[in-house]
Amino acid sequence: MAYDKFGVLTSTAYPLPTENVDTDQIIPARFLKATERKDFDINFFRDWRYNADGTPKADFPLNQEKYAGSKILVGGSNFGSGSSREHAAWSVYDFGLRCVISSAFADIFKNNCLNVGVLPVQVSAAFADKLFVAIEADPKTEIKVDLPKQTVTLVATGESESFVINGYKKGNMLNGFDDIDYLKNIEEEITVFAEKRPF
Amino acid sequence: MAKTLFDKVWDSHVVRKVEDGPDVFFIDRHFIHEVTSPVAFLGLENRGNSVVYPERTFATADHNTPTINQHLPVEDPLSANQLDALEKNAKKHGISHWGLGDVNNGIVHIVGPENGITLPGATIVCGDSHTSTHGAFGAIAFGIGTSEVEMVLSTQCIMQPKPKKMRINVNGKLGLGVTPKDVALYIIAQQTTSGATGYFVEYAGDVFEDMTMEGRMTVCNLSIEMGARGGMIAPDQKTFDYIAGRAQTPKGADWDKAMAYWDTLKTDEGATFDVEFNYEASDIEPMITYGTNPGMGMGVTNSIPTADAVEGGAETYKKSLGYMDFNEGDSMIGKKIDFVFLGSCTNGRIEDFRAFCSIVEGRKKADNVTAWLVPGSHKVVDQIKEEGLDAIIEAAGFVLREPGCSACLAMNDDKIPAGKLSVSTSNRNFEGRQGPGSRTLLASPLVAAASAVEGVVTDPRTILNANA
């Protein structure tokens, strides 16, 4: 499914310093029953955002007005562990987020993000802490994520760190392409390969 | 050049290497289920693509199927809709489909090996992170997202950077009451829930060589719980004996040809890993988790560590214990439980039911415990009956349910109520995993059985010793 191109993003951010946030929290299994990809924002972090009676939990960052409209989420270490459900990445995107910053991501979640147009930005633990401190001090703290330059910057202070992304995936994000576009272009090569497989 | 088992299988499936990018990676076998495939089929159709190799994809319904009255229509309309979509998509694209009631139906990671679809040296993916299970056969197997499911359907390839290599050696002999599940939970506790992120693991050493195929599947299944993409074990005679003669394994000359290849599937002497760990079997006890990720595990007789004794942030640790309603220093033994779940792709095989029965035989389920015993497939059910385990289960006051993922992720009606404490043989103890507000203790079938008859968390060795 097509997603919007990603270039340079400057935005405030939701802070979520809890470590090992798993995809069952990002979207609980009971909300995976759709057969279409739409409206996954509704149950994004359902059980952390809402009480059992459906009222919002006032102290959860995604519910707090001071962060509203942010396009970045800064998460604790080992963000997105657990289930391979791409619904987790969809719910991030559908909520209006285009970038998740963390000192460590789980592999499958990271892959899924890249496939749906959410940029996972891995920074050092020290830089992640710096972001949490800055957001805590001022919820309007702006973070600039520059994909062409592969840098993430605290706008107010200019403190910056570079991040890694392979050239192929970077090109996809910059242009809004996905892997199927690439794979369909080399279909003949795949066919030749497939014919040689023993089973 | 000396190569690892992982290198051999990976490298032989690379169609091309993308410059400054991932490998185009060919997939031999693809499993699909009702939850993570419908959007992939939609995407495929929206792009006007077709399924290029329908014979390489296998559909089974498992995630949100009921575990009682499977002969009746599925009550939950959303679940029914997904099951219907799976069936229709499979039919439309010429993919084999094992729906509810089919003799081959069951949990995807249990029916794959049972039917000989899982083979050494193959690449296997599924939109489910526990696809790592199939690594027990010397396959490279891992979970993928729905975009990748669409890639496999429409091109039989995905684009993956090659993971780094880790080897975990466990040598020695396991003690009484220590099962493959305990070995895995021990390793995860050592590694933490993210210790193997970015790696593919090879398990080696006496303990895995001595293990049955069922046990190897349990270990490889849990690889993802320490962050590894997958885990694998070199195929040996046990592997070949397990797969020989199954419905979809190669036969005759094809078998001989395959065997010639499978015999080469081991790590060469001198091959190197990016990182290697060594553990001793004698250090491993029956395990139990006490927190909200599978890395928060310990020997069942131990006390919950204090926040300053564990890696990671104290705040997250305390939040986790707070959710479980446990305190630092608590002993787990003797904690009153409400539910026991035996099943899942981790521990839903015949051996797990045998282990459970070895404890409950001649005993009675405790009155305060609700127990859900869910075999992983119809073939497991048949085997249970053939061995007379159903009579033992019944006599002890338990009921056998019908196959499915069930309370492992509680997408069907098998939900642990809020606040209730469950000893579960499944794979994840995340907050709300078994139902909103549920509290999960991961453990082996032996610990689950001992706890089910005592009504409190129990060291199975006390019962095994009494039996001896």
Image: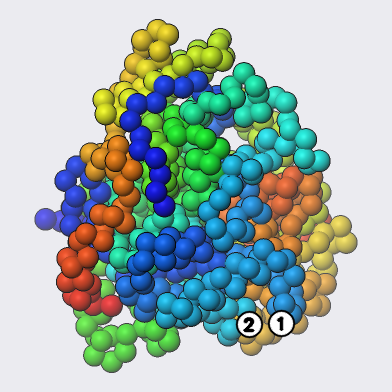
Residue at 77% x, 61% y is B452
**Residue beneath label 2, please?**
B101
Residue B83 coordinates in the image, percent (x, y) = 60, 71
Assign a secondary structure to mark 1: loop
Q: Amino acid at mark 2?
A: Gly
Residue B253 coordinates in the image, percent (x, y) = 24, 90
Residue at 35% x, 38% y is A5
Residue at 75% x, 54% y is B416
Q: Amino acid at mark 1?
A: His
Viewer-side residue, A186 vs A105:
A186
Q: State the residue lying farthest toward the bottom.
A: B252
Q: Quadrant of the N terminus of chain B?
A: bottom left
Residue A192, by quadrant, is bottom left
The answer to whether residue B133 is visible is: no
On screen, residue B79 above or below A141: below
Q: How many marks?
A: 2
Residue at 25% x, 49% y is B22
**Residue beneath label 1, please?**
B71
Q: State the residue lying farthest toward the top.
A: A157
Mark 1 or 2, nearer chain start:
1
How far separated are the C-alphas under marks 1 and 2?
7 Å
Residue B158, by quadrant, is bottom left
On screen, residue B441 above or below A14: below
In this rendering, position of residue B68 left or right of residue A182: right
